[in-house]
Image (cartoon, grey):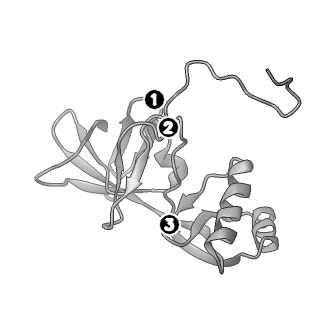
Amino acid sequence: MLTLNTKIDHADSVFAQLVLPYEMRENSRLRTALASGEEVAIFTTRGTVLRNNDLLRSDDGRVVQIIAAHEPTYRITCKTPHDLLRCAFHLGNRHTQTQVGEDFLRIHQDTVLKQMVEGLGATIIEENAPFEPESGAYGSGGHHHHGDGHYHAHGPLAPIPARQKIHRPSDPHS
């Protein structure tokens, strides 16, 4: 069995590609198979999310490229940036994994969420597309887009507070 446990930035050659849906790419322990039928075990650091085109190396030096599988998704667009921002807010408020594009949002297909964003004025297109949702703001390994469609990790997207008081409107003013 091929065991992949080291994420690398570059390789001179790629032994194989492994096509995985997002749900499987967010597992740090995974057993699956290459298209050739060869079994693969993935052991990455807890919290690692594999992104499209990530490279994993085995102990014997073979490199496998991760490919994001096409999945049933909704592409959400709006007439104005304000309306798209409202949709993003309401999806985030429901802790919905959401991919943020230049002028669109993408989520896994869910009829309840579809009705909600349509009610906010969104246009929904059903697509079979690679799904690359944003990582959490306090998660390990935030990412950002480059024009080439790749994601590059650069640590958390926001500072991680050691202690944070939550201020509520009902709190007495001091």
Which quadrant is the C terminus positioned in?
A: top right
- In depth, the one of 30 and 87 nearer the eye is 87
- In depth, the one of 107 and 83 nearer the eye is 83
Give above or below for 20 relative to 32.
below
CA–CA distance between discs 2 and 3?
19 Å
Give above or below for 119 relative to 173.
below
According to the image, label 2 marks what residue? 158
> Hey, what amino acid is under mark 3?
Gly
The image shows a total of numbered marks equal to 3
When asked about the image quadrant of residue 84, the answer is bottom right
Could you tell which of marks 2 and 3 lies nearer the N-terminus?
3
What secondary structure is found at the residue carrying circle 2?
A: loop
Give the left or right position of residue 127, taking residue 59 as reference.
right
Give above or below for 25 relative to 174.
below
What secondary structure is found at the residue carrying circle 1?
A: loop
**Can you see residue 1?**
no
Measured as percent of width and height from the top left, residue 156 is found at 45, 37
Q: Residue at x 30, y 67 (%)?
A: 148
> Hey, what amino acid is under mark 2?
Ala
Which quadrant is the N terminus positioned in?
A: top left
Q: Residue at x 73, y 27 (%)?
A: 166
- In depth, the one of 26 and 100 nearer the eye is 100
Instruction: Name the disc covering residue 145, or none.
Output: none
Measured as percent of width and height from the top left, residue 168 is found at 81, 31
Could you tell which of marks 2 and 1 lies nearer the N-terminus?
1
Give the left or right position of residue 117, taking residue 127 as reference.
right
Name of the residue lying farthest toward the right? 170
According to the image, label 1 marks what residue? 46
Instruction: Tell which tag, 2 or 3, sits nearer the viewer.
Output: 2
Give the left or right position of residue 10, taking residue 169 as reference.
left
According to the image, label 3 marks what residue? 101
Could you tell me if the residues under marks 2 and 3 are in contact, i.e. CB atoms within 8 Å?
no
